[in-house]
Image: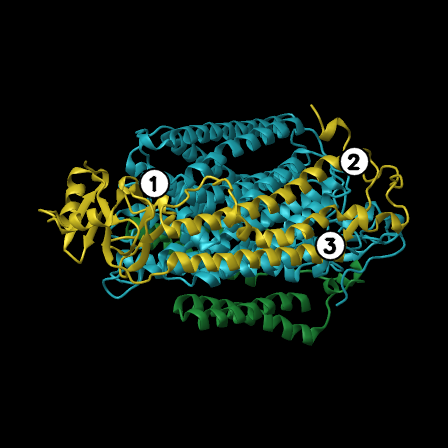
Chain colours: A cyan, B green, C yellow
């Protein structure tokens, strides 16, 4: 059934604001669409696809979290034998792979971005709805493939989520587990690339009239930059995986010394993907934090333009720093990568000051979403500072591959994907479902997670500096590492408790719903103008778009965004850019 | 399309510079190729957008003062339900399983994928009607 | 059951918000109050740049790292202290700003705050100041890096070969070999007080040669040799471990480094090794029998 959107003018304007009435024309076969499971299998609606992505990725998140709990139990005491050596190697490989490839990325660009970006730019759907659906099915197939690793003889892949050659070749990691892992990532890699294409096309071509590039919400800007990073990074991963598969099965010697290949090449290829990948994982969540902080401080985003340029700078720099993961190989150009890695701190700092500037002199509502965003700020602050330390090769030499690095990347990834991710969940849940998540349970969820987070990861910094390497099954008794590991394990279970609270919140809010209305937070951006949940093609009415806060302008025409030192002049329209 | 073009041309310029600096300081092939490739990734669509911007001027969504009626008319065709993405996705899923579990998976996989490709092409020719 | 803050959600159709008390004439907002985030950074800038120089003479805490039993390790340790102090200062400033904003600007009423969206002066400030801090950090990094990775000529050379899952230490001058797998913890002896050059490579996959108390690690790579120097300052036994995932018994790839007087080292290195297994033999042994002591 084709739906053809024809915007037409209506004379109906409230308080003089022009609104658009959007008419939906169905194809001349006016039959009803499929129902039930078939409706889900054939849906190309970005909202349905986005929600499918979010649910699937959250399920995988819980599975990976349970793997983490098993690892922490194994590490709580020295010389424990809860799991075998082989099983433990599978656990950390799969924990990392699920979290990075199957949760953090897909939840953001497949889930939230899919749902929210077309709404934020005023589009009826994504530019390529069927491609969007294909992205989801490839992701689901890839996730199932990855999980199948546990069912094959020889177990799942056990060479780490980075799969360094020659450890990942057929000699050192025989068995179908490694092949399954490679194939799963080929599927999810294509899924991500197609989503990236869709996002760029939607953002460039389907914006509503008046929604110039510099009036898009920061979340949409971040998703645009993320999509470009996906297009830069994922094809390199897919190529490298194909090469690795050929080495494993077709007798090539791309990554092995005998035969004239170069194991270092794998690391270069992988990290040219891998570093932009972690910014692909971070930037959407920065965008969420920006939206939430702005709404719950009841102020516009401070420094909108510098935010945009900071995001572009972070993305550009992040693509040039890949070999800072290879400082200890001894064959990379240390000053080049060290300088660029240190420089990333500058645009990240700009974003931090802009977030603080947004809160400054605001009227801050400490709702659950806002608490999660502030939690993200704390976590990322410390994770970012330790990242600056790691950017210095002499320091990296004694912290690389230790628990110091493990603590660092968990702080940044957990801080973004989990804290800011849940901020997005609490913030946009009313938009998805027209009902609220319980705020009091949300606060319990936050505080348990926040406390558990620090208790889990701070001891890991200490024990890493004491010399505990990462990816170890166990450790000796005589080194004094046990107390730190036990504390870390306790913290992990506190985090687990917080996730139980989340499940309870989801359950009780669904069973006993509280209606939210269209815009419970008095939020600013365009998606809050339409109903909650939005109708099939998103907008039946569109307001005039004159700033980056169309919904706010519609409801609060006397409070436009102004520069510092300017008078409070409601008649003066702010023109942000002239093109 | 002007700002869109600049975003991608900016990518091209940045990686052109970084690639050149990296080459002349390290003479390392792999990283240089990837940086040059990224420059090309910005150059191609960025140049395309810039060309079209020069040709067609400002669209309603590029103008600060555009009103909603400037966007009147048909927006686009959005196929609202289609089985083919699912079929193609499942075909791809089976195809990769062929590499891991056995070549015999290859045949149903390719069958599904070809069916899906034919189906989606026919659907598009019908204007997206199923 | 509460809906956001136990009140009805803020409705866009509610009565127009009262004028905020902050919308007074613009001279209320001129420099002094906004400088809270600005002046401290200005004063701290020269301090941050000079910090590592100052630190060289200061007794700072070790912030959790080893002080370094080699001269290279001590250089790295000083850099660590400098970065840590910079991190505390910058992180502390930002932390205080976040906490201040959170508590000072908590919701007092439903009045809408001033909708300040930009302020170019302060935006430029917090773009430029971090650039200078970063350049300072980079300069000290390069200085330390040159010290750590310098390989001047030395009298003693040791060829270290990592394998799954153990270490071989070979002294080409006399042909001495020490080899051991996993919990056998082979011991590498070297003289104190002079430069020792290590040639490191791997017989199979990547391994990580890591001596925590030397504040140093380097990959043992298949296909090329990594070369670096140690100038051990204090005699003693230092533990080492593999840090780069190398397969099943990666966790058990332990070794030790023993630093002795040059005379004692000379005696030891001229002693015969006796019958030592080859790398291939030990690899087969582990695969057949598991890790052994």
Name the spot of residue A544 as percent of width and height, x first: 80, 55
In the foreground, B54 or C146: C146
Q: Residue furthest top?
A: C1
Task: Determine which residue is flagged by label 2.
Answer: C10
Tell which tag, 2 or 3, sits nearer the viewer: 3
The disc at residue A544 is none
- Identify the image quadrant of the N terminus of chain C: top right
- Mark 1 to mark 3: distance in Å? 50 Å
- Identify the image quadrant of the C terminus of chain C: top left
Task: Determine which residue is flagged by label 3.
Answer: C122
Please give left or right for residue B89 compared with residue A524 in the image. Answer: left
Mark 3 Cα shell of 10 Å, populated few (<14), some (14-19), many (≥20): some
- Mark 2 to mark 3: distance in Å? 32 Å
In the foreground, C265 or A556: C265
Query: Which residue: 49% across, 71% down?
Result: B21
Image marks 1 and 3: residues in contact by CB distance under 8 Å: no
Q: Is residue A502 visible?
A: yes
Element marked by disc 1: helix
Which chain's residue wears label 1? A
Q: Is residue A230 visible?
A: no
- Mark 1 to mark 2: distance in Å? 50 Å
Task: Determine which residue is flagged by label 1.
Answer: A90
Please give left or right for residue A573 compared with residue A416 in the image. Answer: right
């Amino acid at each position: 059934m084709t739906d053809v959107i024809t915007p037409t003018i209506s004379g109906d304007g409230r308080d003089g604001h022009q609104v658009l009435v959007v008419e939906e024309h169905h194809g001349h076969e006016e039959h009803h669409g499929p129902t039930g499971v078939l409706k889900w299998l054939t849906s190309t609606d970005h909202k349905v696809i986005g929600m499918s992505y979010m649910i699937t990725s959250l399920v995988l998140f819980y599975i990976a979290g349970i793997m983490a709990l098993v690892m922490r139990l194994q590490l709580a005491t020295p010389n424990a034998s809860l799991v075998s050596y082989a099983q433990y190697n599978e656990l950390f490989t799969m924990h990392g792979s699920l979290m990075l490839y199957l949760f953090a990325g897909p939840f953001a660009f497949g889930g939230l971005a899919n749902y929210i970006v077309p709404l934020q730019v005023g589009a009826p759907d994504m530019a390529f709805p069927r491609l969007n659906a294909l992205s989801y099915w490839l992701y689901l197939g890839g996730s199932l493939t990855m999980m199948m690793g546990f069912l094959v003889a020889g177990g799942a892949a056990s060479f780490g989520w980075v799969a360094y050659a020659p450890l990942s070749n057929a000699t050192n990691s025989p068995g179908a587990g490694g092949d399954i892992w490679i194939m799963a990532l080929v599927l999810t890699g294509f899924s991500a690339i197609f989503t990236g294409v869709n996002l760029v096309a939607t953002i460039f071509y389907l914006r509503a009239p008046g929604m110039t590039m510099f009036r898009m919400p920061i979340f949409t800007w971040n998703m645009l930059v993320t999509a470009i990073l996906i297009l830069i990074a994922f094809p390199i991963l897919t190529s490298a995986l194909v090469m690795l598969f050929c080495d494993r099965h077709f007798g090539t010697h791309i990554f092995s010394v005998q035969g004239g290949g170069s194991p270092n090449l794998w690391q270069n290829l992988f990290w040219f993907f891998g570093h932009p990948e972690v910014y692909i994982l971070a930037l959407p969540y920065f965008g969420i934090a920006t939206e939430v902080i702005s709404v719950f401080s009841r102020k516009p985003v401070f420094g909108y333009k510098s935010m945009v340029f900071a995001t572009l700078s972070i993305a550009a720099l992040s693509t040039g720093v890949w070999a800072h993961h290879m400082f200890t190989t001894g064959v990379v150009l240390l000053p080049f990568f060290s300088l660029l890695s240190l420089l990333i701190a500058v645009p990240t700092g700009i974003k931090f000051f802009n977030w603080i500037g947004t809160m400054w002199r605001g009227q801050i509502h400490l709702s659950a979403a806002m608490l999660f965003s502030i939690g993200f700020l704390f976590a990322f602050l410390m994770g970012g500072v330790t990242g600056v330390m790691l950017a210095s090769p002499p320091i990296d030499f004694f912290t690389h591959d230790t628990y110091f690095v493990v603590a660092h990347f968990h702080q940044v990834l957990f801080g973004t994907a989990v804290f800011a991710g849940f901020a997005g969940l609490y913030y946009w849940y009313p938009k998805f479902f027209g009902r609220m998540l319980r705020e009091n349970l949300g606060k319990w969820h936050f505080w348990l997670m926040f406390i558990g987070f620090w208790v889990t990861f701070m001891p890991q910094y200490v024990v890493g500096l004491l010399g505990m390497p990462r990816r170890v099954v166990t450790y000796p008794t005589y080194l004094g590492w046990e107390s730190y590991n036990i504390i870390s394990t306790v913290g992990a279970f506190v985090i687990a408790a917080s996730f139980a609270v989340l499940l309870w919140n989801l359950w009780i809010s669904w069973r006993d719903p509280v209606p939210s209305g269209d815009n419970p937070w008095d939020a600013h951006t365009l998606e809050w103008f339409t109903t909650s949940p939005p109708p099939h093609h998103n907008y039946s009415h569109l307001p005039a778009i004159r700033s980056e806060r169309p919904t706010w302008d519609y409801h609060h025409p006397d409070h436009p965004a102004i520069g510092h030192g300017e008078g409070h002049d409601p008649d003066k329209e702010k023109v942000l850019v002239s093109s | 399309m002007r700002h869109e073009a600049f975003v991608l041309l900016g990518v091209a310029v940045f990686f052109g510079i970084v690639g050149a600096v990296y080459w002349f300081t390290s003479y390392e092939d792999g990283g240089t190729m990837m940086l040059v490739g990224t420059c090309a990734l910005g150059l191609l669509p960025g140049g395309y957008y810039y060309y079209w911007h020069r040709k067609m001027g400002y669209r309603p969504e590029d103008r600060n003062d555009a009103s909603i009626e400037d966007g009147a008319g048909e927006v686009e065709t959005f196929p609202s339900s289609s089985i083919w993405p699912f079929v193609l996705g499942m075909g791809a899923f089976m195809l990769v399983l062929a590499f891991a579990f056995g070549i015999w998976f290859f045949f149903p996989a390719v069958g599904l994928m070809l069916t899906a490709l034919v189906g989606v092409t026919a659907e598009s020719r019908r204007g997206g009607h199923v | 059951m509460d809906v956001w803050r136990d009140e009805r959600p803020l409705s866009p159709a509610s009565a127009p918000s009262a004028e905020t008390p902050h919308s007074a004439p613009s001279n209320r907002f001129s420099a002094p109050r906004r400088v809270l985030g600005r002046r401290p950074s200005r004063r701290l800038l020269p301090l941050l740049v000079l910090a590592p120089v100052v630190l060289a003479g200061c007794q700072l805490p070790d912030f959790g790292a080893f002080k370094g039993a080699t001269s290279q390790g001590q250089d790295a340790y000083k850099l660590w202290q400098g970065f840590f102090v910079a991190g505390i200062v910058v992180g502390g400033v930002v932390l205080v700003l976040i906490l201040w904003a959170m508590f000072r600007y908590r919701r007092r009423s439903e009045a809408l705050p001033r909708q300040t969206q930009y302020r170019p002066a302060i935006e430029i400030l917090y773009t430029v100041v971090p650039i200078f801090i970063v350049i300072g950090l980079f300069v000290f990094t390069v200085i330390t890096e040159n010290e750590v990775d310098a390989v001047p000529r030395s009298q003693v050379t040791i060829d270290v070969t990592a394998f799954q899952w153990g270490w071989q230490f070979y002294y080409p001058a006399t042909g001495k070999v020490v080899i051991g797998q996993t919990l056998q913890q082979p011991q590498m002896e070297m003289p104190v007080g002079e430069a020792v050059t290590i040639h490191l490579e791997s017989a199979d996959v990547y391994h990580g040669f890591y001596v925590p108390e030397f504040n140093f690690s380097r990959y043992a790579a298949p296909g090329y040799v990594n070369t670096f120097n140690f100038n051990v300052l204090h005699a003693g036994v230092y533990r080492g471990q593999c840090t780069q995932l190398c397969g099943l018994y990666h966790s058990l790839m332990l070794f030790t480094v023993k630093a002795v007087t040059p005379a004692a080292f000379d005696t030891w290195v001229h002693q015969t090794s006796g019958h030592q297994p080859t790398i291939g033999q030990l690899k087969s042994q582990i695969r057949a029998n598991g890790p052994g002591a």
